Image (spheres, grey):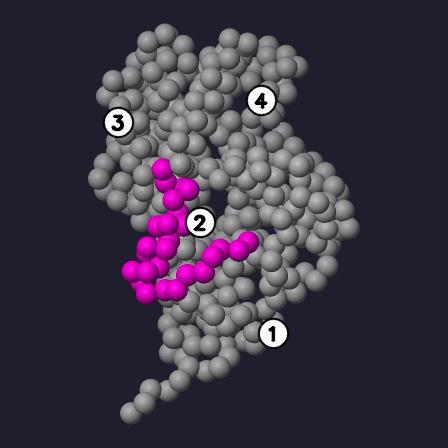
Amino acid sequence: MTPAAPPATGWLPRAWLPKSSPMPAAFSAQLDLIRWLAALLVCITHVRSIMIADYTPASGLAGRIFYFVHGFGHSSVITFFILSGYLVGGEVLQSLQQGNFNGRAYFAKRFTRLYAVYAPGLMLGFLWDWLGARFFNSQGVYTHGMDAVMVPFDISTRLTTEIFTGNLVFLQTLVVPALGSNSPLWSLANEAWYYLLFPLIAAACFAPISRGSRLGCIAFFLACAWFVQGQILLYFGVWLLGLVPHFLPRPILKKGWPSLIALGFLMGMVRCHQLDFLPMPVPDYLLGVLVMIYLNTLSHQKSDTPRFAPVHHRLARFSYSLYICHWPFALFLAAVSQHYLGRGMQMPFGLYSISYYLAVLGITYAFAWFVSCHTEQHTPTMRRRLSAWLGVKTREEIPQRILP
């Protein structure tokens, strides 16, 4: 008996989905700029917290400016969520709208994008933390924890096979803590689960699949949502905000600068703790809405490619490697300096400590770039090989944007 063919349309009509067109080079360059700036803000926030003591009134005006700039790490992570929703979610919408969404192709793309850097990054982070705890723990940061450097726990107890394996399958914050000192890995768990949750519900709504497959997608989505619950599910709404610009036929604002000013003002309010009276994650959702409006405006602007577009592209190319690798590596460098020179961690604010900080920041950036050259920049090759193994035909990747 011949099995029934899947329906020609999904549960909801594909006409509801936005149409696609190539992403303008100028907009692509602007996204690159946002990516590397967000990664920079995360990195400098964390490296500062390791090396330079927290603000005191004695720091003066220069200190106020310095500490103010070095406090936008969390806001930058929220920006990454919006960008991810816009790009990854938009790609899913595009495939569904064109009727060529392929689960295996999507898996190959997302798996290689995540693991090309993530698996080596976990191993390198484990190595730096183990070396630091074994040989350079004179400050006690690896065994006693230090609130001042955002590691109020015994790092050495988080260097186990169980925790490594849990992080490898993105179970940090759910079943195990983040590996070693690398607390920033919490957001990677969020991302990985969003990559699974969104296509499940999107395919259930729009893919031309059988009723059984549709019910299977919904059941799997509900099971995953029940499993992650809490913080990951709470911030899924922030990630979904990145999809909104795809459905807007025209820009909310004619110019990008009003939304950029509002975004900067809100980030400043959060940085100065003026919104602490609001329950979390309300400030993050407000921030997400403003980032979404800014992306919506940029995506509709017709402008020339920025003069420094190649620079933005090169810096953005290793932003993922920087995010994964920066914390344990910078902590290790500071611990080595503290061990041999008696300085390098929690130094008082001043020219001397800033010089140390800039040196470690530069070395950390160079290390992340080196890692990316051997991992992140080989993602297309890895993707082609995995796609061939899965029997998926690949095509040249063309930056896309979704338009109504």
Alpha-carbon neighbours of circle 3 within 10 Å: few (<14), some, or many (≥20)?
Answer: some
Q: Furthest residue to the bottom? A: 1
Q: CA distance from mark 2 to mark 3?
A: 27 Å
Q: Earlier in the sequence, mark 1 or mark 2?
A: 1
Residue 272 horizontal/vertical position (percent): 63, 29
**Does residue 394 show up magenta in the picture?**
yes
Mark 2, residue position: 191
**Viewer-nearest of discs 4 and 3:** 3
Mark earlier in primary sequence (2, 3): 3
Q: Amino acid at mark 3?
A: Trp
Report, in whole angstroms, how far the alpha carbon at label 4 lies from the one at label 3: 30 Å
**Residue 308 falls left or right of residue 39:** right
Q: Is residue 321 above or below residue 202?
A: above
Residue at the spot of label 4: 67
Along the polypeptide, which appears first: circle 4 or circle 3? 4
Q: Which residues are magenta?
A: 374-399
Which is more N-terminal, label 2 or label 4?
4
Please tell me whether mark 4 sits on a helix, a strand or a loop: helix
- Give, as a three-letter code, the residue at label 1: Ala
Residue 130 — which label?
3
Q: Which residue matches tag 1?
A: 15
Label 2 Cα crowd, 10 Å radius (few <14 / some 14-19 / many 20+): many
Quarter of the picture holding the C terminus: bottom right
**What separation in Å lies between label 1 and label 2 (alpha carbons)?**
28 Å
Say which element carries label 1.
Answer: helix
Q: For residue 145, which quarter of the picture? A: top left
Residue 365, placed above or below residue 239: above
